[in-house]
Image: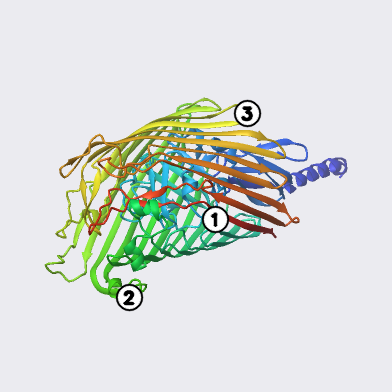
């Protein structure tokens, strides 16, 4: 007992000390990119009260803190964020990218997170600020700010995107370029891609891989456009409404709602757009609804949903001949106006993604998706009915290993895609009815069903030879096949066209290296292989049989480039030189007004230079002024091109401008005024393979200014006004290459661009 009395104070002290230790609760969390949820390692975590750096996040973005308080999270390339952290909680910290430090951001374009400045491929980021510079109606002004990319738009629903000249020979729409909305393919089973139907307000970022430089996405010589939907934000609830009007009867409304708790978040975006259009038979009506949600089920599991629905009815003015283009550009093609041609389509996509962390060095991501499209399109030569239904799965493992004490980041996975395409044509009897009646459906002319499928198996690894040098090796295996079922009764005039077409397995390798000469300057180089599949329509011969001798276009891309910035980060620059050699050039030879056959006719050589400069002239607490210059120089030629008896070898590639120059100035201030001015120059384009006709070079100047005001702590007001084509330039916004005249009519090469036009609107944002 005397011993216990003597030692009692000491024992009590030990107990109190132990209780204090075990009573402290660790604060845990993970730091991610706010739009694509890529983990952000090595983020500084600073306590605001004493400005002491307590921790730096782990390579996988996780962190632990043993003291409650308000902390600031700082990482190069991202806007810093402050948040009050409480004990006994697990936090997901979402950081948004800083547009003035794009080379520093962590990209996920090839599924292996890495800083853009360490990438071995030519990748461009279009941020949400870039998207908001324009009138959120057209994709073209946004994409055309990126070197190497050119989007022509004959109307809001008539577009063609080319990357480094690839896809320029596709007569209608975009082909030979892959596109994804998050992990969901927007490219159908025959290689056609449509992105312009989506609402720009539902997109937060574009990541664009140029050239055949990705082993992850498979078929697509031109590259890949990755659309990142507006993410749903945690710990935030707000509603944003926007209403705008403009020239040519433009009326648009947007409602954007976000609700987020600690671990679950939801975002819904609805838009309604109407335009009468500049030209005859040019009205446009579109409604969209996009839903995203994120659910952090545990420290190791994340579930996300993505759904999108588009309801579109857009009339088609089509292309016109040179006389009409110069004298009456607002006119529609005569037959399209008489038939009142239009497209009426409904499309939807739905995807579920699951991310699981097995341990700190191994993750798995799996997405299951489905999509559909139903369309009705009366044209002067027939009426087309289409139904497409697609399903697929994409899964990949992402790991980090050590080899000779150096990091190897790797991914391996696969994608399986299948779509069913049913289409039928009907006689259009519009000529048998009084003028103004429009299209009238007649007898069925054809009835087809296509089953199209492909699979990609891919692997890619980035090995850090040293802290400054990264070696990238990738491999893609693709198999694509089609089955055509002709469901129309066979006859002498309509032979049975049923059949199968299957590509041989195509293996596409990639090798790249990047080296950091300093923290602000890096050089990269790559050699990569790619291919583009044929569409089933291109394989059909006039006698109705499938031409199994056709080969897909394949090519090698050779590139060297540099990225960097000045020490104070005021100037950022990216430059690249490349050569893309394509063989088995596929030519669509027109046989009738609505029929084409495909032939392999030679090779093309694409030599180019791409330059991007961004400079911050002024950046203080009150005002920021920045400018950009983007330049693309294209030297694209037919290396070997013989079409029937015509030898076009050595000619310029059709449908691609000689060069593109884009520059602009952005202004922002804390007192609410902001604005930008943008100048675009587009060089001349060959319209015919013989190069006997070129489009005129043109320039456009656009301007936008706005005012933002905090009405109270929760309500923000934003008003804006803009003018496009300020100097009212007459130009062709899209051309139809190698157009033929039928019935003695002149060829219709030109889609007139809009003259000077304005838009204005108001935006209200309320934070709950």
**In this view of the protein, which residue sits in the foreground, 566 or 610?**
610
Residue placed under numbered mark 2 in the picture: 434
Say which residue label 3 marks. Answer: 568
Mark 3 or mark 2, which is nearer the start of the sequence? 2
Q: Say what secondary structure mark 2 lies in.
A: loop
Q: Which residue is mark 1?
A: 201
Mark nearer the N terminus (1 vs 2)? 1
Q: Is residue 94 visible?
A: yes
Q: Assess whether mark 3 and mark 2 are in contact (beta carbons under 8 angstroms).
A: no
Q: Earlier in the sequence, mark 1 or mark 3?
A: 1
Of residues 304 and 580, the one drawn nearer to the viewer in this rendering: 580
Residue 62 figure quarter: top right
**Secondary structure state at the residue bearing disc 3:** loop
Q: Is residue 194 visible?
A: no
In the rendering, which numbered label is found on residue 51?
none
| Residue sitting at x 15%, y 69% | 490
Q: Secondary structure at mark 1?
A: helix
- The Cα–Cα distance between marks 2 and 3, rounded to whole angstroms, is 70 Å
Q: Residue at x 27, y 68 (%)?
A: 425
The residue nearer to you, when weighing 98 against 297, is: 98
């Amino acid at each position: 007992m005397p011993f216990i009395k003597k030692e009692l104070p000491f024992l009590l002290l030990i107990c109190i000390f132990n209780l204090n230790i075990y009573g402290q609760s660790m604060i845990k969390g993970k730091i991610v990119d706010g739009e694509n949820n890529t983990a952000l390692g090595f983020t500084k975590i600073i306590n605001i009260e004493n400005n002491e750096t307590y921790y730096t996040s782990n390579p996988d973005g996780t962190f632990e803190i043993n003291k409650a308080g308000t902390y600031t999270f700082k990482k190069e390339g991202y806007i810093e964020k402050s948040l009050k952290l409480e004990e006994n909680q697990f936090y997901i910290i979402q950081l948004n990218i800083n547009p003035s430090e794009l080379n520093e951001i962590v990209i996920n374009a090839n599924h292996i997170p890495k800083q853009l400045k360490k990438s071995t491929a030519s990748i461009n980021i279009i941020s949400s600020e870039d998207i908001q510079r324009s009138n959120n109606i057209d994709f073209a002004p946004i994409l055309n700010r990126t070197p190497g990319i050119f989007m022509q738009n004959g109307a809001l629903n008539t577009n063609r995107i080319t990357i480094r000249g690839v896809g320029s020979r596709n007569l209608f729409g975009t082909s030979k370029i892959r596109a994804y909305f998050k992990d969901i393919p927007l490219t159908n089973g025959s290689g056609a891609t449509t992105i312009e139907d989506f609402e720009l307000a539902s997109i937060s970022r574009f990541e664009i891989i140029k050239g055949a430089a990705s082993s992850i996405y498979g078929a697509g010589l031109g590259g890949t456009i990755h659309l990142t939907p507006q993410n749903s934000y945690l710990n935030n609830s707000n509603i944003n409404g926007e209403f705008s009007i403009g020239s040519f009867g433009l009326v648009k409304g947007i409602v954007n709602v976000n609700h987020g708790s600690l671990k679950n978040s939801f975002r819904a975006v609805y838009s309604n757009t109407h335009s009468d259009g500049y030209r005859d038979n040019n009205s446009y009506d579109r409604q969209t609804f996009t839903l995203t949600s994120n659910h952090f089920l545990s420290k190791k599991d994340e579930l996300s949903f993505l759904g999108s629905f588009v309801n579109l009815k857009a009339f088609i003015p089509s292309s016109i001949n040179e006389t009409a283009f110069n004298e009456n550009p607002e006119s529609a093609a005569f037959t399209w106006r008489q038939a009142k041609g239009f497209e009426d389509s409904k499309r939807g996509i739905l995807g579920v993604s699951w991310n699981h962390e097995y341990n700190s060095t191994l993750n798995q991501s799996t997405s299951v998706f489905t999509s559909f499209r139903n369309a009705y399109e009366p044209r002067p030569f027939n009426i087309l009915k289409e139904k497409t239904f697609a399903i697929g799965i994409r899964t990949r493992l992402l790991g980090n290993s050590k080899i000779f004490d150096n990091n190897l980041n790797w991914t391996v996975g696969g994608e399986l895609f299948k779509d069913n395409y049913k289409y039928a044509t009907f006689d259009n009897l519009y000529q048998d009815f009084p003028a103004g009646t429009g299209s009238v459906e007649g007898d069925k002319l054809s009835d087809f069903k296509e089953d199209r499928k492909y699979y990609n198996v891919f692997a890619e690894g980035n090995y850090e030879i040293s802290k400054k040098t990264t070696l990238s090796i990738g491999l893609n295996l693709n198999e694509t096949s089609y089955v055509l079922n002709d469901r129309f009764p066979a006859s002498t005039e309509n032979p049975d066209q049923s059949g199968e077409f299957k590509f041989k397995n195509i293996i596409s390798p990639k090798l790249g290296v990047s080296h950091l000469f300093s923290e602000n300057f890096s050089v990269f180089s790559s050699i990569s292989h790619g291919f583009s599949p044929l569409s089933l329509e291109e394989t059909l011969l006039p006698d109705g049989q499938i031409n199994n001798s056709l080969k897909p276009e394949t090519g090698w891309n050779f590139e060297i480039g540099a990225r960097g910035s000045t020490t104070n980060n005021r100037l950022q620059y990216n430059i690249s030189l490349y050569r893309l050699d394509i063989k088995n050039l596929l030519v669509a030879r027109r046989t009738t007004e609505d029929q084409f056959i495909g032939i392999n006719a030679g090779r093309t050589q694409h030599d180019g230079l791409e330059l991007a400069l961004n400079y911050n002239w002024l950046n203080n607490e009150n005002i920021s002024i920045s400018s950009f210059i983007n330049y693309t120089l294209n030297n694209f030629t037919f290396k070997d091109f013989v079409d029937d008896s015509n030898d076009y070898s050595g000619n310029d590639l059709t449908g691609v401008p000689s060069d593109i120059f884009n520059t602009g100035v952005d202004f922002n201030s804390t007192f609410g005024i902001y604005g930008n001015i943008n100048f675009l120059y587009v060089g001349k384009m060959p319209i015919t393979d013989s190069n006997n006709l070129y489009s005129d070079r043109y320039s456009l100047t656009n301007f936008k200014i706005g005012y933002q005001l905090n009405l109270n702590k929760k309500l923000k007001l934003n008003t804006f006004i803009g003018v496009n084509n300020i100097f009212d330039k007459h130009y062709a916004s899209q051309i139809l290459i190698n157009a033929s005249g039928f019935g003695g009519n002149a060829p219709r090469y030109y889609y007139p661009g809009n003259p000077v036009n304005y838009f204005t609107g108001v935006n209200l944002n309320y934070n709950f």
